[in-house]
Amino acid sequence: MTSLVRPDAALAASWAETIAEFHAGGEQHIHGSGLWDFETLDVTEEGCRTVVDHLLSQADPATVLPPGRVHCSYFWITDGPDIVGFLALRHSLNEWLLNEGGHIGYGVRPSRRRQGHASRALALSLAAAADLGIERALVTCDDDNLGSRRTIERCGGVYEDTRNHKLRFWIDTTREME
């Protein structure tokens, strides 16, 4: 069953496999992973611990962030013991996030797509967003990403507009999921 878990170095092997699968498929930028903060990525267990510490710090209001950044809770999307993707829940919106990035970003590893993981993860993240006081979450996708558009709509996304080739949807986080 699809779950959202906080990053944990105990999942280092599955994390490294997931990263390798994204990269093998030509995806260097992995949505929701928070890995763009690392110029080079060490996929060893020690490297995973470094990433986990960094990702967990991003949610802490005491962490001083660089200009233009917002606090963010990172989750690993799991199915049993396996990581199947990543999800980022941004605590607020800056100008770029309002126009393109949104509150929630996610990516599912290629071999686990079209199995409902993205829909379930997005639904679970809406409860976490509500816990943060976010009443309406902005979720975006590329204008040519039909799968992500359907996922967002399935979770109650209401289309607002398109900006810079990004479809923008708002989801009421207090809405009961079916």
Image: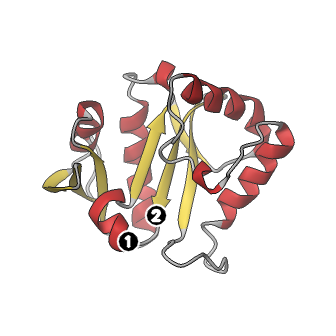
Residue type indicated by callout 1: Leu
Q: Residue furthest top?
A: 111
Give the residue at mark 2: 90
Quadrant containing the C terminus is top left
Residue type indicated by callout 2: Arg
Q: Percent position (x, y) of residue 177?
A: 29, 46
Q: Percent position (x, y) of residue 175?
A: 26, 56
Left or right: 11 with respect to 172?
right
Q: Residue furthest front?
A: 39
The residue sitting at 44% across, 44% down in the picture is 106
Q: In the rendered image of this protein, does residue 26 appear above or below residue 73?
A: above
Labelled disc at residue 75: none
Labelled disc at residue 93: 1
The residue sitting at 66% across, 57% down in the picture is 55
Q: Secondary structure at mark 1?
A: loop
How far apart marks 2 and 1 lie (CA) works out to 7 Å
Q: Percent position (x, y) of residue 28?
A: 54, 37
Q: In the rendered image of this protein, does residue 22 appear above or below residue 162?
A: above
* Labels 2 and 1 touching (C-beta < 8 A): yes
Q: Nearer the viewer, residue 132 or 62?
A: 62
Q: How many numbered marks are there?
A: 2
Indicate the quadrant where residue 161 lies: bottom left
The residue sitting at 72% across, 51% down in the picture is 51
Q: Which color scheme did the rendering employ for the protein?
A: secondary structure
Q: Percent position (x, y) of residue 165?
A: 22, 49
Q: Nearer the viewer, residue 104 or 161?
A: 161
Q: Secondary structure at mark 2?
A: strand
Indicate the quadrant where residue 15 lies: top right
Give the crowd class for mark 2: few <14, some 14-19, many >=20 residues within 10 Å: many
Left or right: 35 with respect to 12?
left
